[in-house]
Amino acid sequence: MAKGTIITGLDIGSSKISAVVCHTIPSLDGQMKIIGVGAANSKGLRRGVVVDINSTAEAIRQAISEAELMAGVNIESVCLGISGEHVVGQTSRGVITVKNASQIIKDDVDRAVQSARSIAPIPDGQDILHVLEQNFVIDMITKSNEPIGMPGSRLEANAYIITANTSGIQSLLNSVESADIPSVETLTVSPLASAKSVLKRDEREVGIALADIGDQTTDIIVYKEDAIEHIAVFPVGGQHVTNDIAQYLKVTLPMAEELKLHRGCAWTQWVTEEDSNPVPITMDSSPPRFISRLELAQIIEYRMVEILEEIAKEISDMQLPAGLVLTGGTALMDGLTELAEEILQLRVQVGYPLELKGLTDRVNYPMFSTSIGLAMFGESLRREEKQAQVLRRSLSPMGGVFRIIKEWFGY
């Protein structure tokens, strides 16, 4: 396979690291086929932030090696995801005077977006990861998502600025470098990647929220009019449910995780009378003891209500006709969508990666939404870059060769 047709999404989570290798098909406008998957238990992270570079690097190597073996390729670059409480977003507004009032051109749009970026108050210790266009206003009257070609003398750009902690970014990049991966192609906030792989355009247009319930954090992203409107990360996730079970039942964390995954239920009302068989709990050579599934559901429901109430705080004042999508491994828990609909009074569904080809049986699960989305996000940036190169060549009288220099936060 040609080197430029391989792209890899690398999701470094608090409990699991997953790598998805895709082969892009240039003749089909960048359509991707999944050819390799790798996963490893994550070590060295706490609430999405690297706290042990060596342990994280070793887990990355395991996931990458598994993916390389399955795909039959050497992975030389990755599209990397980043998450954690330090990821924050804000809307910023920039205004410029259009050079030629008869027609707005791309340079005007770029300057307006740059103006929005430059005036955004960025806290010390934070770096900008994304500057995402929301909409434009022409002459304080006309709102447009595509202002190029329209007449106007004043152009206002609304952009969503996403930042992350400088040291958090650096620790993540150092971990990838220590794992002997030659380069990072893109660095993308995880909820943006999850949305890329799960949400449809018509859902993003009318208004929708996505919550990716990870191990130690929950990522939330909201879209309206096909533009990001809000992003948030809070430090509660599926691992907190496991901890609750372990503490209440006085069992090991692996046993608690087993109970959660295979017998757990998020809503006590979802436990039927027919499901009355007690759940056995075995510990080493000790005699087995039993707990009712209803009692197990009560433990789980308490924590899931907390997570859903946090989600409600983030989206309570937003109009979301398309409702809420839950993704991540915890999204598959019995009764969770029903409990979420009861608390949020919204339509709730589980989000799976869309439009997959290739090894779909291995990755068609919510826990792979982010890693697949990272590859999709990276591929879309590749296409945009190629289109920009073609445009620059067409504008050059000599059809010259252009160099593209990417700056990675000065690292």
Image: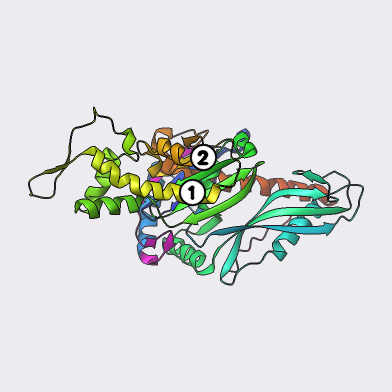
Q: Residues within 10 Å of mark 2 (few under 14, many from 20)?
A: many
- Percent coordinates x, y for residue 276 in the rendering: 21, 32
The magenta segment is 33-54
Residue pointed to by mark 2 = 324
- Percent coordinates x, y for residue 360 in the rendering: 43, 34
Say left or right for 370 vs 285.
Answer: right
Task: Identify the residue shown where x is 91% and y is 52%.
Answer: 100
> In the displayed structure, would residue 271 be above or below residue 167?
above
Residue pointed to by mark 1 = 311
Say left or right for 7 vs 405.
Answer: left
Residue pushed farthest top? 274
Residue pushed farthest bottom? 124
- Percent coordinates x, y for residue 325 in the rendering: 50, 39
Q: Is residue 400 visible?
A: no
* Residue 47 on the magenta segment: yes
Q: Nearer the viewer, residue 112 or 404?
A: 112
Task: Identify the residue shown where x is 34% and y is 41%.
Answer: 266
Quarter of the image with the C terminus is bottom right
Q: Is residue 202 visible?
A: yes
